[in-house]
Image: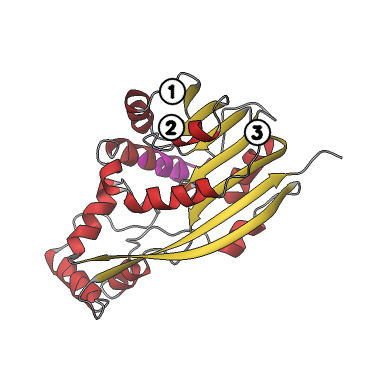
Amino acid sequence: MNAAALLNKHRIAESFSRAALTYDAAAELQRQIGHRLLDALPATEAARVMDLGSGTGYFTPLLRQRFVSSQLVSLDLAQGMLAYARAHRPDPAAVWVCGDAEALPLADNSLDLIFSSLAIQWCERPERLFAEIKRVLRPGGRFVVATLGPGTLHELRDAWAQVDGDMHVNRFVPRQQLLAALPPGLKLQDFRTEQRVLRYAQLRQLTAELKGIGAHNMNQGQATGLTGKARVQAFKAAYERHRDPDGLLPATYEVYYLELEKLQDR
C-alpha cells in the first residue's frame, strides 16, 4: 500500500471514529438501505456471519434475529465505531474486529455469509477487496452488499464544479469497473440499482448530515486550506439552481445492491 493510500485509510478511520456518537441520529438513509439489504439475504443456515463495515453495530441485533445460533463477526476500519458498538449493542456470541476490507484479518474459508451495507465504497481497489472476500468465504458462501455508485451526490459535485476545479465530493466506482474487478470463482448472482433522493429546505441540513455520519471528502486531490467566503457563497448559489418546484434541494444517492457467491471447488 502506498503512502497516499495509507493516509487515506487513516483519514477514513479517524473521520468515522469521530462520528460514532452522532452517526445513528443522522443515518436514516443508511438504515433504510441496510434494511432493504437484510430483506435480500438468502434463506440459508450460516455458522459464521460477518458484518463488513459494521459501524455503530445497528445491524448486529437484526442479524442476530436472522441467525440465532451463528457467530457474528463485526468488522470495521474505525476503532471508535467498534467501541461504540460493543458498549451500546453487545452480543455475547459476537466478536468485534478492527480491520481493512482489503486485507481481512481472517482465515481462509472461514465465513458462510458476509453482509455489508454502505462500506465498500471506501475501498480504493475493488480487485483486492473481492480477492479477500473470495479468500475468506467458504465454497458456496455469499457476499450480500450495498454500495454507492458515481451518481451519488451529483448535485453537490455539480455545484462545486461551477466554483473551482478541486475535488470536493467523494468519487465512487462505476458498475463496469466494480464488476470487472471480480475474480474467477466469485460469481455475480444478482445486481440491482436504485436512486434515492433526499430533499432539504436548506443546504446546511445536507452538509450537517454528511458531517454527522463522518462522510467527509476522502479523495486525493481535494481542496486544501480554508475555503474562502466568496467561494462558499458561489457554491451555495450554484446549488440553489437545483431547488425543485416544491422549494426543496435534492441530494441523490445511486445505490448498488449485489449478491455474490463463491463457487464450489471443482
In the image, taking residue 210 as reference, residue 127 lies left or right, namely right
Are the residues tagged 3 and 2 within 8 Å (C-beta)?
Answer: no
Q: What range of the chain is rendered magenta?
A: 1-11
Identified by mark 1, the residue type is Asp
The numbered mark, 3 or 1, whose residue comes first in the sequence reads: 3
Whole-percent x and y of residue 171?
Answer: 43, 59
Are the residues tagged 2 and 1 within 8 Å (C-beta)?
Answer: yes
The residue where tag 2 is placed is 61
Please tell me whether mark 2 sits on a helix, a strand or a loop. Answer: helix
Please tell me whether mark 3 sits on a helix, a strand or a loop. Answer: loop
Residue positioned most to the left: 229
Whole-percent x and y of residue 228?
Answer: 15, 63
The residue positioned 49% from the left and 31% from the top of the image is: 64
Viewer-proximal residue, 116 or 131? 116
Please tell me whether mark 1 sits on a helix, a strand or a loop. Answer: loop
The numbered mark, 2 or 1, whose residue comes first in the sequence reads: 2
Q: CA distance from mark 2 to mark 1?
A: 8 Å
Q: Which mark is residue 247?
A: none
What is the quadrant of the C terminus in the image? top right
The residue where tag 3 is placed is 45
Residue positioned most to the right: 266
